Amino acid sequence: MDEASTLVSVDNDAKFVAIAEDFLGNDNRLKLLVTDGGTWVKENKDNKFDYIFTDTWHGKYLMLEQVLAMLEKGGVYIIDDMLPQPNWPDGHAEKATNLIAYLEEREDLLLTKQVWATGIIIGVKK
């Protein structure tokens, strides 16, 4: 990040935000928030971002359209946990497969899928 950049990180668990605060809290470009992801998306739906990493259901499944609408042209959308995992509940593999197919069909995203760790998908908005 350059000096003009900012980063907003949202988590609903204060203990994870506290860890980030311990390591990165002295950077005034960083805003760490403890809140529900869905609430945050609703409250910030009119804002635009160059980079969105989502590790939550809101950003991948529940509010996908709203989150992708927040992505600037040329912006990067990253999601993880897209390869089958032993701890997935019944039916989740189908949700992930359907999400991937939907993202592949979108004409406003260029995608790359990485078979690394839990499975990363990177999309760039056209």
Image: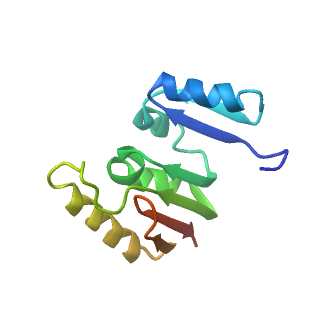
Image color mode: rainbow
Question: Residue at image x 19%, y 48%?
Answer: 89
Quarter occupied by the C terminus:
bottom right
Question: For this view, does 67 lie left or right of residue 86?
Answer: right
Residue placed furthest toward the right: 3
Q: Residue 38, percent across and down?
A: 40, 37
Question: Residue at image x 20%, y 62%?
Answer: 94
For the residue pair 15 and 49, the one nearer the viewer reads as 15
Q: Is residue 57 placed above or below 97 in the rendered structure?
A: above
Question: Residue at image x 23%, y 50%?
Answer: 88
Question: For this view, does 23 lie left or right of residue 100?
Answer: right
Q: Residue 105, percent across and down?
A: 37, 76
Residue placed furthest toward the left: 90
- Image mark count: 0
Question: Residue at image x 67%, y 42%?
Answer: 7
Q: Is residue 103 placed above or below 27 in the rendered structure?
A: below
Q: Residue 64, percent across and down?
A: 39, 54
Q: Quadrant of residue 117?
A: bottom left
Q: Residue 6, percent across and down?
A: 73, 42
